[in-house]
Image (cartoon, helix red, strand yellow):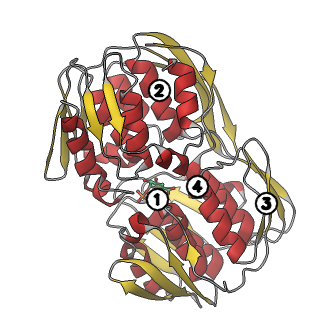
């Protein structure tokens, strides 16, 4: 299979959620460009509409208009669909609002842990009632919050962002320290919008809302999604020949851990035309076919490539030698138990993979991979194994592919366009 062409990934999912929420929390008209139009982004838009905010339709290639205003108590349960970022960040936003809201999601989201967010929000002063242990549905009633300092036991951008958003809506300073730096889109957007926030190593100090909410109309531009681009990068690396140009890709260092690992594995990747969009670094990525070798991915690298592990594990199965991913227990609480499913699916295709404690081991080989993959409706598993299926000689059948629409609408069309398969 030969790759060729120039392609742009869809808008960044993490930044889209944050841009929609901050626009909705303003008191003005905001125009958002480059917004992701996938299911997860639509979940955030839908929930904001239920809170009384006017959010225009999310249509590919079209700007989205949001009219920020005071939020009102929702009449019905807020359904966050499959989106962990929607529910966790929204809990933060709602913590500073003095009304009650009930949140739920699909079966996958209802299984995911929420106490990591609701416990600190409760300490800040929000009233939270869960109906089912650690998970959704949850009812939150925000109120008068106290200023807050938190040592987070997990490197989670969703948790960190929920607390910063609670500080913003509750009008109180918040300080969060993470064990390892997670993606910093909230911090960058806060600063871009003029909010007083300081970063010192792994500690983030938000000093309070200052002049927020903004009342003068503004615009935000969302760059292309680094995680979606990773699937195209992998397809190019595993091709027999050719090269690919991926334009307008977010290259925020807290998201590009996968590029550093791929380079270590021998990949031929160049970034050009680096620029900044709304406080986020963006570049064009040039990538060509390469033979890869195994590597060890250390625990402190994991937060910077957490969503790319399914794809990196697939690449590792085609590399020479063993690849180890250290301390990837967080993968058990993603849209599926990604840790177990990566290993079982790779084994189902004839590759050697195992989980020992929280570590994932993948043994590379050049044997053709064939068999059945159970995606469990997890978009990143579906896309990672679809890319593996483009490798010459492989015969991979997926249980479903529709889940790709959670983060990357038109994924299969893009993959076919660049690989011709
Ligand atoms: C995200 C943070 C990460 C990531 C998720 C999006 C975000 O989750 O896996 O896809 O937008 O903040 P955690 O915060 O749970 O690590």
Q: Is residue 292 left or right of residue 323?
A: right
Mark 2, mark 1: which one is toward the viewer? Answer: 2
Mark 1, mark 4: which one is toward the viewer? Answer: 4
Q: Is residue 25 above or below residue 359?
A: below
| Mark 3 vs mark 4, CA separation in Å | 15 Å
Q: In which image quadrant can residue 245 be found?
A: top right
Residue wearing tag 1: 157
Locate ligand 1 by image quadrant.
Answer: bottom left
Which residue is located at x 59 percent, y 79 percent? 94
Residue wearing tag 3: 56
Task: Measuring from the top left, give residue 67's x and y in whole percent.
Answer: 82, 67
Q: On the rendered image, what quadrant is the N terminus found in?
A: top left
Q: Which mark is residue 39?
A: 4
Q: Earlier in the sequence, mark 3 or mark 4?
A: 4
Q: Is residue 327 visible?
A: no
Q: Is the shortest distance between ligand 1 and the CB of mark 2 under 8 Å?
A: no
Kindly state the secondary structure of the residue where label 4 is placed: helix
Q: Is the shortest distance between ligand 1 and the CB of mark 1 under 8 Å?
A: yes
Q: Is residue 204 left or right of residue 101?
A: left
Which residue is located at x 47 percent, y 26 percent? 233
Mark 1, mark 3: which one is toward the viewer? Answer: 3
| Mark 3 vs mark 2, CA separation in Å | 32 Å
| Mark 1 vs mark 4, CA separation in Å | 20 Å
Kindly state the secondary structure of the residue where label 1 is placed: helix
| Mark 2 vs mark 4, CA separation in Å | 23 Å
Q: In which image quadrant can residue 53 be found?
A: bottom right
């Amino acid at each position: 299979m030969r790759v060729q062409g120039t392609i742009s990934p869809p808008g960044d999912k993490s930044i889209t959620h944050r841009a929609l929420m901050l626009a909705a929390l303003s008191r003005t008209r905001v125009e958002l460009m480059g917004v992701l139009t996938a299911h997860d982004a639509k979940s955030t838009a839908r929930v904001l509409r239920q809170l009384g905010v006017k959010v225009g339709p999310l249509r590919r290639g079209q700007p989205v208009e949001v009219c920020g205003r005071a939020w009102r108590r929702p009449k019905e349960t807020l359904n966050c669909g499959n989106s962990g970022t929607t529910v966790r960040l929204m809990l933060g936003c709602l913590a500073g609002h003095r009304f009650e809201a009930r949140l739920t999601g699909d079966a996958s989201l209802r299984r995911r842990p929420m106490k990591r967010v609701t416990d600190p929000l409760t300490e800040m002063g929000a009233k939270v009632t869960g109906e089912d242990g650690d998970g959704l549905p949850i009812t939150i009633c925000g109120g008068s919050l106290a200023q807050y300092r938190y040592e987070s036991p997990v490197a989670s951008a969703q948790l960190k962002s929920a607390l910063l958003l609670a500080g913003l809506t509750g009008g109180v300073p918040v300080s969060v320290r993470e064990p390892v730096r997670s993606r910093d889109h909230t911090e960058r957007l806060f600063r871009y919008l003029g909010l007083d926030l300081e970063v010192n190593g792994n500690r983030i100090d938000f000093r309070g809302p200052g002049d927020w909410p903004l009342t003068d109309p503004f615009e935000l531009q969302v760059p292309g999604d680094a995680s979606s681009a990773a699937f195209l990068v992998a397809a190019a690396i595993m091709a027999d020949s050719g090269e690919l140009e991926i334009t307008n890709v977010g290259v925020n260092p807290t998201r590009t851990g996968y590029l550093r690992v791929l380079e270590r594995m021998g990949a031929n990747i160049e970034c050009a035309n680096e620029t900044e969009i709304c406080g986020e670094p963006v570049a064009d990525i040039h990538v060509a076919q390469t033979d890869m070798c195994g590597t060890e991915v250390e625990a402190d690298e994991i937060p910077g490539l957490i969503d790319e592990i399914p794809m990196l594990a697939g690449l590792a199965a085609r590399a020479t030698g063993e690849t180890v991913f250290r301390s990837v227990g967080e993968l058990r609480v993603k849209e599926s138990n990604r840790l177990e499913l990566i290993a079982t699916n790779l084994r189902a295709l004839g590759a050697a993979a195992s989980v020992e404690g929280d570590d994932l081991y993948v043994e590379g080989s050049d044997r053709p991979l064939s068999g059945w993959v159970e995606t469990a409706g997890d978009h990143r598993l579906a896309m990672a194994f679809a890319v593996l299926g483009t490798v010459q000689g492989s015969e991979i059948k997926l249980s479903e592919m529709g889940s790709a629409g959670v983060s990357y609408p038109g994924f299969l069309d893009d993959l076919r366009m660049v690989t011709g398969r």
